[in-house]
Amino acid sequence: MCFESLAMLAWRNYGCGMRNELENGGVAAVIVAAGRGERAGKAEGPKQYRTLGGKAIIARTLHHFLNHPAIGQIVVAIHKDDEALFADAVGPLPERVSIVFGGATRQESVLLALRALSSANPAKVLIHDGVRPFISADLIDRVVSGVSPESGALPVLPVVETLKRGTPAGYVAETLDRSGIYAAQTPQGFPFSAILTAHEKAHSSGGKEFTDDASIAEWAGIPVRLVEGEPDNIKLTWARDIEMAQQRMAALAFPDVRTGNGYDVHSFEEGDHVTLCGVDIPHPKRLNGHSDADVALHALTDALLATCGAGDIGTHFPPSDPQWRGAASRIFVEHAAKIVRAKGGRIANVDITLISEAPKIGPHRTAMTEALRQMLNISADRISIKATTNEKLGFIGREEGIAAIATASVIYPGETPE
Ligand code: MG
C-alpha cells in the first residue's frame, strides 16, 4: 500500500477511532525530556528548557498533549537534576501529568515512564520527543488512529535527498535506492502492554541500544504501521535548529501594531517666538503654557503614551510640578519613547498636524523633522509634519492660539501561538 493511501485510511478511521479511545482504557502519552542536549550547546543548558516565543520548548510540547481530547495520562521523563527547571518551565499541571526521573539512555527513560503507567494500564501509548514542539493535533490523531491492539503506528516522511553510502576515505561507494525509505518521527504509538513487554525484554537482554521505540517494536516482532508524518514536526537537535525555530515563532507571531492619538491646544500671549516640534520660530506672540508650550510635542507625547496604555503627559509630568516650568518639551517626547521601547515597541511612524493661522510652518519643516528624528531615533521618512489653517474660524481663526493633533503607530512584540 502506498504511503498516501495509508494516511487516507488513518483519516477515514478518525471518527470511530476517537470514540473507541474512551471505551478501551484510553490513550496515554510519554514525553521524553531527560536528555542533556549537548549537541545544541552545553553552555545554554538542556535544550528542552530553552524558550521559543517566551515559552519553554518542553512546555510547548506538553501543551499539545494536554489539550488533545484523546490523551489521558501523561508521563514526562526528566533528568533528576532538572526538577526545578521543569517546574519553572511548565508551571502548575493537572493531576494526570506525572514525572519520572529518566535513566542513562533514552531507552531506559522510556522504560521507566512506561512502568509508571502500569497501574493505569492504558490501551495505547504515544511516545514523543520533548524537543519536538511543533507537533500538531492532526498528527496525534493519525498516530492514535493508526494503533491497533496488534500493531503500532509510526509517523514517517519520505526521504527526499538522494542517498549515498560513503567509503571510509570519503568517496562515494554507492547510490542507495531510496524507494520505500522513510525518516522516522515521533510520537510513535503502540498497544501499551505490548510495548512495555518489549521494552522490559530489551532491557533484560541487555544487548543492543535502540534509538527509537519503533526499533524495539520491530525487534520484538510487533508490526508497526506507517502513518504520514509532518515536515514541521522537527526534532530540535542543534543550536541552529533552535535559532530557526525562534525565527519561525517570530514569523507566526500575531502582528501587534497599535495606534495612539494626541491633541493639544495652547493660547497666545505677548512674546517674540513660538516653539513648535522643538524648533524656535520668531513670532510676535508666544504660546502660554507650563513648559515651553510646544503644542506639537505635547500632542505627540500623548500619542506615544496611548500606544501602550501609559496614561497621558499629565500622568508623567504633572503641571503642578514646578520643575517643568519652561522645560524643553523634547524631554516629554523622549520619556514617552523610552516607555514605548521598554515595552519592546518600535515606532513605525509619527504624524503631526499643526492647526494655526500663523506662523507659517513650511520654511521650518526640515528643521522640525530633524529635531524629531533625534528625539525618536527613527528615520525622516517615518516622520510627517503637516500644517493647516482654520480658515479664520473660531479661536484658531482669530489667532488666539494653536492646536496640534498627533498620531503614532508602534509595533509591539506579537503574541506567539501555542
Ligand atoms: Mg500642552
Image (cartoon, helix red, strand yellow):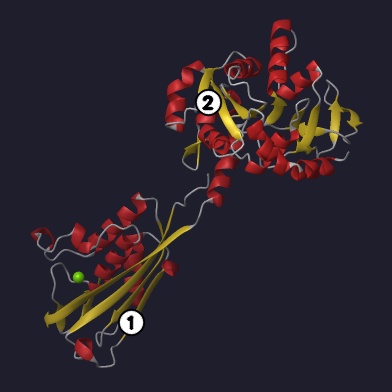
**Residue type at numbered disc 1:** Ala
Identify the residue at horizontal 58%, vertical 46% (top origin): 248
Task: Indicate the position of residue 326 as horizontal and vertical percent values.
Answer: 13, 66
Task: Indicate the position of residue 190 as horizontal and vertical percent values.
Answer: 71, 26
**Residue type at numbered disc 2:** Pro
Residue corresponding to mark 2 = 46
Residue corresponding to mark 1 = 387
Q: Nearer the viewer, residue 316 or 270?
A: 316
Image position of 20 (left or right of 42): right
In which quadrant of the rendered view does residue 378 lie? bottom left
Image position of 316 (left or right of 75): left
Name the mark nearer the viewer: 1 or 2.
Answer: 2
The quarter of the rendering in which ligand 1 is drawn is bottom left
Q: CA distance from mark 1 to mark 2?
A: 58 Å
Q: Nearer the viewer, residue 223 or 110?
A: 223
- Rate crowding at label 1 as few (under 14), some (14 to 19) or many (20 or more) other CA atoms within 10 Å: some
